[in-house]
Image (cartoon, rainbow, N blue to C red):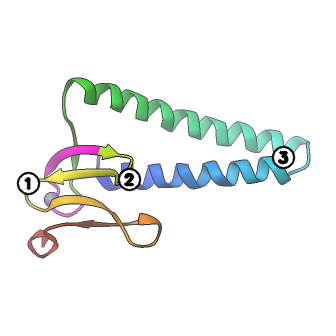
Amino acid sequence: MRFSFWFYLCKSVTVLFIVFFCLLIFLAEGFWKNLLIDIALSIILTVCFIGMVMAFVMLFRPLKMKCPFCNEYGEVGGDKAEGIYMICDNCGKIKGTGFFKTKLSCTNEDDAQ
Ligand SMILES: [Zn+2]
């Protein structure tokens, strides 16, 4: 799996989660609300499940994903302060930066070309 895919998937789910709760509060009871809850819950639960499986795998061996800059495989990690990031042998540490941390960048950006 590509790291950028997983990175943006996590971002989308976080946004979806917020939107989901807003709609839950403001939307009137009825067909559309039920439909929306079904769809949102399926997506969130699916991604949570994938995340759970990956976290489980990470307990036993390093999780490898494809680097978005050079396509080599690198180790993925994460913590509360920095969110999810990956370590690439060529590009250094790759993580989200900028507005809402939505832009991926690496520490050795000049060598990544
Ligand atoms: Zn790389």
In the image, what residue type sits under mark 2? Phe
Which residue is identified by label 3?
Answer: 32
In the image, what residue type sits under mark 3? Trp
Which residue is identified by label 2?
Answer: 7
Q: In the rendered image of this protein, does residue 41 appear above or below residue 110?
A: above
Left or right of residue 53, residue 21 in this image: right
Ligand number 1: quarter of image: bottom left
**The magenta stretch spans residue 74:** yes
**Residue 26 placed where, x, y %?**
84, 54
Residue at the spot x=62%, y=35% of the render? 42
**Residue 5 placed where, x, y %?**
37, 52
Question: Are there few (<14), some (14-19), or many (20+) residues within 10 Å of tag 2?
Answer: some
In the image, which disc is placed on residue 89?
1
Which one is nearer the viewer's eye here, 104 or 68? 104
In the image, what residue type sits under mark 1? Asp
Question: Are there few (<14), some (14-19), or many (20+) residues within 10 Å of tag 3?
Answer: few
Of helix, strand and loop, which one carries label 1? loop
Q: In the rendered image of this protein, does residue 86 appear above or below residue 109?
A: above
| Mark 3 or mark 2: whose residue is earlier in sequence | 2
Q: Would the CB of label 1 be found within 8 Å of ligand 1?
A: yes
Alpha-carbon distance for marks 1 and 3?
Answer: 48 Å
Residue at the spot x=16%, y=72% of the render? 109
Residue at the spot x=19%, y=58% of the render? 93
| Mark 1 or mark 2: whose residue is earlier in sequence | 2
Alpha-carbon distance for marks 1 and 2?
Answer: 19 Å
**Residue 103 placed where, x, y %?**
37, 68
Q: Is there CB contact under 8 Å for labels 1 and 3?
A: no
Q: Nearer the viewer, mark 1 or mark 3?
A: 1
Give the residue at the far bottom of this rendering.
110
Question: Are there few (<14), some (14-19), or many (20+) residues within 10 Å of tag 1?
Answer: some
